[in-house]
Image (tube, rainbow, N blue to C red):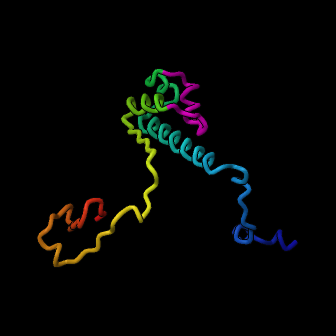
Amino acid sequence: MEDMKMGIAEKIANAKKSNWVSEGISKSEVKTIVELAKISAQIERCRLDMGMTQQKFAEYMGVTQAMVSKWESREYNFTIRTLNEICQKTNLKLFVSLDKPCVKSDYNIVEWESEKVGKKRRDNGYLRLVYDKGAIA
């Protein structure tokens, strides 16, 4: 009876934390799901910005409406070739990176000393001084 009087906000606040949604799914699979969703959403957003239905967009892209539907399904596993073709026709840019993630220890952090910076180069209103190659300013 007490549970019936509790509002939705209270139920959410009192809910037990759980990871059941992602239980048993590898980090790689979760990343794949997220990346496919981002790609699909971007293609759909582009199509909508162009004011096209899936059918008109399919004609423009030279594919079937069913293929556009698959692209927008958040599950279609794109090839690099397909992504490049989509990007070429929609003026989107594709960036693929296989670099190792950067960590703070990979870089020298530069601390500013105003008297040393005085006559150095100005970029976009910010003063920059790099002490050695590879330093981040």
Q: Is residue 39 magenta?
A: no
Tell me the residue at 48%/29% (across/down).
Answer: 82
Position in image of residue 69 (x %, y %): 57, 31
Quarter location, residue 107: bottom left
Q: What number of labels is visible?
A: 0
**In front of the other: 104 or 48:** 104
Residue, x 31% and y 63% (percent of image)?
A: 136
Side (left or right) of 73 relative to 21: left
Residue 94 drawn above or below residue 4: above
Residue 73 in the image: above or below residue 29: above
- Give the answer, above or below, for where 39 lies relative to 22: above
Left or right: residue 128 compared with residue 86: left
Residue 15 in the image, given as x and y percentages of width and height = 74, 68
The relative height of residue 15 versus residue 53 in the rendered view (above or below) is below
Percent of width and height locating residue 124 = 21, 61
Which stretch did the figure color magenta?
A: 63-79
Q: Residue at x 69, y 53 (%)?
A: 22
Looking at the figure, which quarter contains the N terminus? Answer: bottom right
Residue 39 is situated, as x and y percent measured from the top left of the image, at 50, 41
The quarter of the picture where residue 8 lies is bottom right
**Nearest to the observer: residue 33 or residue 101:** 101
Q: Nearer the viewer, residue 128 or 83?
A: 128
In the image, 111: left or right of 65?
Answer: left
Q: Quadrant of the C terminus?
A: bottom left
- Residue furthest toward the right? 1
Residue occupying image coordinates x 56% and y 43%: 37
